[in-house]
Image (tube, rainbow, N blue to C red):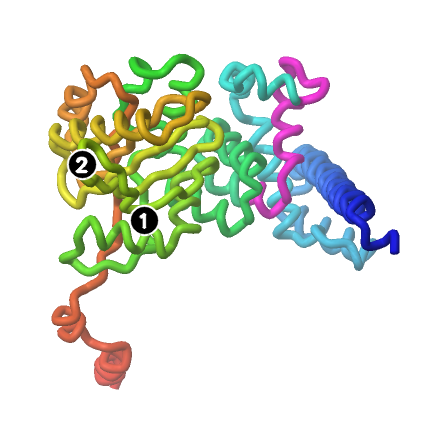
Amino acid sequence: MVFFNKEYKDWLVELKSRIRSAQIKAAVTVNSTMIMFYWELGEMICEKQTAYGTGFIPQLSKDLQGEFPNMKGLSARNLAFCRQFYQWYASSNLQQVVANLKRHELERIPNIENDQINLVKYYVSQIPWGHNIYIFTKSKNIEEALFYIQQTIENNWSRDILDLQIKSNLYKRRGKSINNFEQTLPEPLSDLANQTLKDPYIFDFLSLDIRYRERDIEKQLVQHISKFLLELGKGFAFVGNQYHIQMSDNDYYIDLLFYHTKLKCYVVIELKNTRFIPEFAGKLNFYLSAVDSLIKDESDNPTIGILLCKDKDNIEAEFALRDINKPMGVSELELVENLPENLKSSLPSVEELEQELNKLEG
């Protein structure tokens, strides 16, 4: 039958894709309309509250809910968020907002040009209201808020992932590694590579005791690869761990090998459960040369190396990378170590603490 031939199946796949795309566009349109309504509502509340006093928002909520009982978002709490939402952006210094955005980002935004307030309104309307609340209540300034908005749009973060990234202070960590990208990579690749790296990398999802080794970290990172990739950031594709390369009849093993889809290059990650020493850069440089010679395709950009160490001296790391002609960066890794069993046994249990509290109350 015609319904089972390849042409029909291919057409059906395309049709399903178009339907999904239409659903997403419809949802974005509905969301944008609601966010703009909340913006205007917040503006009106700000204008009226001075005249009507502190009881204004609870009374307004009561009156609106009485008229629109099935409409969400009219609670006193949400009306207060609408006011805070408008005040946060409207009262911020927006002069640097457009200047800090890259030209290609502005080009894809319709009819904005250099109108700062409309630019902000466009961005906030692209993400759900719950995401917006997280961002404007937890960000310290508008640059940080816009960073998380752009990252949410680009990476399609859920609210839980957004909350995790804010709590781990991604805004401050991104682009902070010690690296030699400016000297070893052409623009704009050097800037993109710099923004790809963080310092520190936080691996709080691992379960390690005090006496762990690099191989223990590596093993658990692979076991928790989805969380590891989330911490690395968008674009990293896992190739392998203890990746085998052979050079002059000698065997070598790279801790972790990735390919970055945006940078279009391989990324070698070496783990060191110790303080950074300059010798680490020499070994990583060797691995980068090997990957460039044995694995890299002609169309790929130069391989990048990342050294993740437990601690580092920034000046020492800068000197170590200064005359190396391969692109690499040095960042710290943060782990949450589990208590050893002998220490755990010496701590009181919840039941024992409750018994002691009952004694004190008695």
Query: Could you tell me the amino acid type at mark 2?
Result: Asp
Locate residue 155 relative to residue 270 in the image: left or right: right
Residue assigned mark 2? 249
Please name which of the two marks, 1 or 2, marks the residue nearer to the observer: 2
- Which residue is more in the foreground, 221 or 85? 221
Mark 1 or mark 2: name the one nearer the start of the chain: 1
- Element under label 2? loop
Is residue 34 at least partly visible in the picture?
no
Report the residue at 65% width, 52% height from top: 76
Q: Quadrant of residue 46?
A: top right
- Which residue is more in the foreground, 299 or 322? 299
Q: Is residue 100 above or below residue 5?
A: above
Q: Residue furthest right?
A: 1
> Does residue 125 belong to the magenta stretch?
yes
Q: Residue furthest front?
A: 249
Specify the segment rendered in magenta.
Answer: 109-133
Residue assigned mark 1? 203
